[in-house]
Amino acid sequence: MSACKWMADMLLTMFTVYLFFLYFGMFFERRKKNIRVLLGVIVLVLWQVGIPEVINELPKAWNIGTTVGLALFVVANVFEGKAWMKSFFAVTFAAIWMLAEMLIGSVLMIYGESIVERQIFGAFASRFLFFLIILALRKVFTNEKVTGLPTGYSILIIFIPTGSIYIMNAVFVLAYRTDWEYAEGYSLVSGLILLFINVLIFYIYIRLADDLRIRRMNLVYEQQLDLCARHQEERELSVLQMRDVRHGMRNHLLSILAYAERGEREKLIQFVTDIIEDGRLRPSEEINTGNIVTDSLVGYWKKKAEDAGIEFLTDLSIPMEMPFRGADISLIMGNLLENAVEGAGRAEGRKYIRLKMKYDKNNLLITIENSYRGKLAKGKGEELRTTKTDTSNHGIGLPSVRRAADKYQGVLSVDTTEPGRFLARVVLYGS
Amino acid sequence: MIKVAICDDDIATTGKIEDMLCRIAKRNFIPIETEVFWEGEHLSEAVESMNNFDVIFLDIEMGQADGITVARKIRETDKNVLIIYVTSHESYMQESFSVRPFRFLVKPVEEKQIAGCLEAAYEEISSADSYFRYSYQRLNCKIPVRDILYFESKRRKVYIVTEKETFEFYGKLNEIEESLRASKGIFLRIHQSFLINYKHIKGLAYDFAVMDNEERLSISEDRRKLISKQYCAMEDTFYVGM
């Protein structure tokens, strides 16, 4: 019997450790240093083994305190991340687990009078419930699209499962205390309804995030269509110009012939250079790499920048076709160029934007540098926050660039070490 | 001395570029030697017969063998030469990027553009023109940095891998990395035990690099972000083609 109990304890401990890693793995990266990880795991195991003995001796408040404290200690050792985030998730970890345990406990107290090995069964059941909750959370949090929802939404939505856990607890406790004969049936049904609502909420959450993403993509596509249309117009204009030039060519040739016949070499040279200098035969000023998305986008922002009195320097060595989706390029370039034009426009002294694109070893390298004035707001992590007041419409810039770059295992790096100079670099890997 | 080859099937263009190059070189005190080819085959044959150039100005639109094919052939024998495409189109074909071109010049070529190109090339060449020195079994040895593909450390030994042979000595990769940083040669530490020469990377993905000898070296996970940043910064030598 004792061996059996010991086995069950071991299994329980292992399951808890697994749950612990499953939960925190959603939010944090595991550390590389093995000694600290080992220390953390050992503490976790000891804590789990020792729990039944300690729990009965300590008062309730102390109990919660040690649980949170130990969870925090282990998380700090095993995972990387910010301290305040760790404490937040450690507290929620403890809270969810306790609620799960209370819930199972209440259910057992009401319906499980006949189960002899109540404690072990309860421990297993509560952990299993916790496991289900974690799985559900994982579905929501590791889904790349879903993280795109604004944090305000997420917090509000998290309130629903948390609140329903509380309500469920209250329902069972009340049902347990009351003498009314139908209480058991009612409480069970309301528990099931609450569960159903929670499942629905997760589903709605995912749909909402999906919707938001699609709306954003649509915005990008719309922009791209606009730019392409504008580019097309410019193209048509230059075709018309070309027709003019071709028409004029005959006259030019006649003049050249005349100069040649008369042997007037100096005049002939002067005439030909004049025609070349005229601009129509020189490589045109418009951006023309043959890559329609890039051309239209850069052309558009170049014009915008120059209208605002900003010097716009380009060096584009890219082929006509690249292994990257137009929408992604457009998202990345559009956001970065918009930021650059805005930043350089407010700069004091020299206003400039320097754009370099290079296609190298099947990878695309983009560098955008611009002058700016004023402060950059540093948000959490290395993310820069928008300084614009209308935050709901702005500030999606750099994160969405980062997300688009992620698709190609790419990296966005921002360099603001030199005062007055903002430098953004993007690498996209094509292979 | 910088050896420059100019290849274009239009004789007038080659003459113009050669004239400009000589003028720019004289003005900037860059010692140069030029050779002109009017056919791509002749150029690739010259490269094959150990006529090692430092810079090649290559026309893409040539009659018989087009510039891209010629460039590919050249790359088979010479991995170091800087290829500068001269083209009359502003849009470039994707194939033309496969030989790692140094620059693109759009015809009609102006002196300012050529000057920028030549100066950048000169800087590039002279920076790669140093030696890596080490001692092994009380022998002092040196290897031109431009020949080194990568350093690999195994136990206490460091192996220097070049295209043809591998050398070894006792040393620490950290110290080598530090000393090479001073000598301008661009080396990337992609792994705890690999230090690779950027100039000899044939292909680069986020998690591995293919060297000129077709060897595939993986980039360790914690260095990927840094390598990406360095990669982008390295290719960012700006040049305004207007």
Image (spheres, coloured by chain):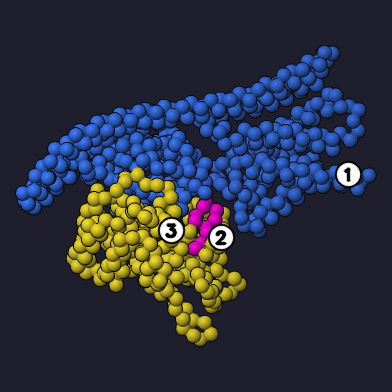
Chain colours: A blue, B yellow
Q: Position of residue A231 (x, y in %)?
A: 32, 32
The residue carrying mark 2 is B216
Q: Earlier in the sequence, mark 3 or mark 2?
A: 3
The residue shown at (40%, 31%) is A224
- Kind of residue at badge 3: Arg
Classified by dominant secondary structure, the portion drawn in magenta counts as strand
Residues at marks 3 and 1 on the same chain: no
For the N terminus of chain A, which image quadrant? Answer: top right
Q: Is residue A423 left or right of residue B196?
A: left
Viewer-nearest residue: B32 or A89: B32
The residue shown at (62%, 57%) is A33
Q: Is residue A343 left or right of residue A209?
A: left
Q: Residue furthest bottom?
A: B138
Q: Identify the secondary structure beneath mark 3.
A: helix
Q: Is residue B204 magenta?
A: yes
Q: Is residue A243 above or below residue B151?
A: above
- Kind of residue at badge 2: Arg
The residue carrying mark 1 is A5
The residue shown at (54%, 76%) is B168
Q: Is residue A344 left or right of residue B227?
A: left
**What subunit carries mark 2?**
B
The residue carrying mark 3 is B72
- The residue mark sitting in front, 3 or 1, is 3
| Magenta-drawn segment | B203-212
Residue A206, by quadrant, is top right
